[in-house]
Image (tube, helix red, strand yellow):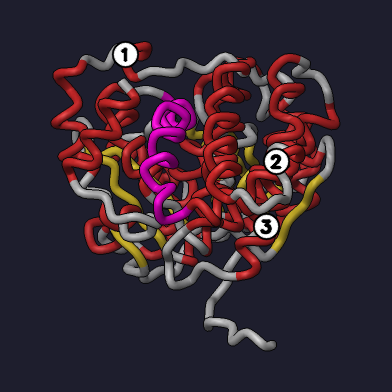
Amino acid sequence: MTTTLAPFSFHTTPGLVFRPSAAGELGAIAASRLGGSVLFVTDPGLTRLGLGEPAIASLQEAGLKVTVFDAVEADPSLATLMKAVEIGRAANATGVAGFGGGSSLDVAKLAALLLGSGEDLDEAWGVGNAKGPRLPLVLVPTTAGTGSEVTPVSIITVGQEEKRGVSSALLLPDIAVLDPDLTLGLPPAITAATGIDAMVHAIEAYASRSANNNPLSKTLAREALRLLAANIETAVFDGQNMEARSAMLLGSMLAGQAFANSPVAAVHALAYPIGGTFHVPHGLSNALVLPHVLRFNAPEAAHLYAEIAGDCFPDLAGGDDTQGRCSAFIERLAGLSARVGLQQRLRDVGIGEEHLAKMAADAMKQQRLLVNNPRAVSQADALDIYRAAW
C-alpha cells in the first residue's frame, strides 16, 4: 500500500556550526559573510558576564569593526529594536551578529532586515510580508530553548502588552553557531524554562494542523524530544555536564527546525498574554499552560501525543492503549516540569483570577498560532484553560 505525500516546503538556516569553543572562532567562521562593520546585538547581563568577549575579539582580530548594542531586554520592545537599528545605521553596519537568548536573536534578525531594506516594519508584521533584502546575519544562541537561530520568526512587544511577529524566510540567518560552552553557566531556573520551551516547540510542531506539517518536521521533532527529555534534568541539576548541555542545545535547534516549518499552536498563543502582561519568562509561560492545553486537545490529538510519548518517556512506547498513553504522557510532562523546579500554577507567578478573562481575550489575537491547533479554541475555551491552570 502506498501513501500519497502532501506537498510541503522546508526552509532552514543554510550553515550550521556545532562545537565547543566555536564562539571564540566567530571571526574565522563568519567574517567573510559580515563585511567590514558588524552590529553585535546582545543583552546587558551577558555583557556583565563577559560571555561575548571572545566572539567580539575574534571578529576584531579578523579585521572587522564591531559596534556593540547590549540593551536587549526580555520580551524586547519596539523601542529597543528601533534603537538597535539607529545604532547600526550610525555605524554603517554591513552585517549583524546576534549573541544571546531568543530576545537578542529576535532583535538581531529584525535589525538586519530593517538595516538592509529600509522597509516599513508596520508592513512587515505577519507571515510572508517582509520584502528584504536584509544584511548578512549570524546568530549565536546562549540558551537551549528558543531555537531562534533556525527559525524565520521574530517576536517584538508593541505597546505595553501586545506581542507581534514577523515570519519570513528572510529572517533565517546565513550561519548559526552553536557552542555548548556558552550554556554551561545558565542558572537552573533558566535551564528548566528554556528546556521545557524547546520541548513545547517539538510537541506542537508534531501535532500542528498546519497544511505544511511534513515528514521532516515530524522526524526532527521526535529526535528533539528524545534528546531534550533524556537530558533536561541532568542539565538543570548538574549544569557543568557537557554531554547534557550539548544534547539540550542540539535538541533545541532540532525543535526549532521542526516548528519553523510546522508552526506552533495554542500553547504559545495562551502563553503570550502571560509573558506580555505579567513579564513571566516565555519558557515558563509555556510550561504553565502546557498540560492544560494538551488535555483540551486530547479529543482530537490523542493519537499524535501517544505516538511521541515514548520519545519523551521510553516506558510509554508501544501498546494499543492510545488514550492511556496520551493521558500518561500529559501527566508525565506536568511532573517533569515540577521536578525541574518550575512554578505550576498561574497564581504562583502573581496572576490573579480576575485577570483571566482579559488574558483569554488577548490570546484570541494570536490567530496565526491558533489556526495550527489540533482543536479549535474559542475565547470561552481559552478562559477554561486558564482557569484550569490558575
Whether residue 43 appears in this view of the structure is yes
Label 3 belongs to which residue?
A: 220
Secondary structure found at label 3: helix
Secondary structure found at label 2: helix
**Amino acid beneath label 2:** Leu
- Magenta stretch encompasses residue 292: yes
**Spatial CA span between label 1 and label 2:** 31 Å
- Magenta stretch encompasses residue 324: no
Residue at x 73%, y 46% (from the top left corner): 317
- Of callouts 1 and 2, which one flags the residue occurring earlier in the amino acid sequence? 2
Q: Which residues are magenta?
A: 281-301
Residue 347, numbered circle: 1
Which callout, 3 or 2, points to the residue nearer the camera? 2
Label 2 belongs to which residue?
A: 316
**Amino acid beneath label 3:** Leu
- Of callouts 3 and 2, which one flags the residue occurring earlier in the amino acid sequence? 3
- Mark 3 neighbour density, 10 Å: few (under 14) some (14–19) many (20 or more): many
